[in-house]
Amino acid sequence: MDARRYRIISSVCVAAVAFSISVALVLKQSLIVLIAAISGFIVQWAARRSLDEAIADERTTMIEDRTSGRTLRISTLGLACTGLLLVILGQNGYPQYSEAGYILMYVAAVILVIRLAFYYYYSWKYGG
């Protein structure tokens, strides 16, 4: 399969999964979300395996690495700050926000632990 056909399949797959998830949210059926996500993953994986040529060079890989790292940092910081703000609001007269704030801060902490684990793993694997 050539790169153009792969991009078309990938775009159609993403659109189909997004449509399925939106329909599932309207119908309040979480099973549809799970099926759509898994089938989308399988279609993407199969399309990538049948690809004949490389779709990413070193520059593209470097750009993806930097953008994903920056996105992770900004998202984690946003989660932690929003969680802290909700906890502060919960202590100052809005108790319904405290639980959501703690959950957001725990999610941020879990993301940081996972990132640290991957950092140590790849540092060990590549000898850095």
Image (cartoon, helix red, strand yellow):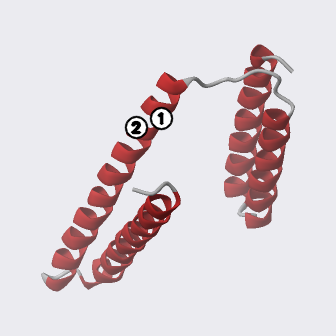
Residue type beneath disc 2: Thr
Circle 1 — which element? Answer: helix
Instruction: Give the residue drawn at x 45%, y 69%.
Output: 117
Query: Which disc is residue 5 wearing?
Result: none
Residue 47's x, y, as percent?
83, 34
Residue type beneath disc 1: Glu
Query: Which disc is residue 67 wearing?
Result: 2
Residue 70's x, y, as percent?
34, 44
Q: Are marks 1 and 2 in contact (CB under 8 Å)?
A: yes
On screen, residue 15 above or below 24? above
Between the C-alphas of marks 1 and 2, the distance is 5 Å
Q: Quadrant of the C terminus?
A: bottom left
Disc 1: which residue: 64
Circle 2 — which element? Answer: helix
Q: For the residue carrying disc 1, how many other residues have a C-alpha within 10 Å: few (<14), some (14-19), or many (20+)?
A: few
Q: Is 21 on the left-hand or right-hand side of 78? A: right
Instruction: Give the residue drawn at x 28%, y 57%.
Output: 78
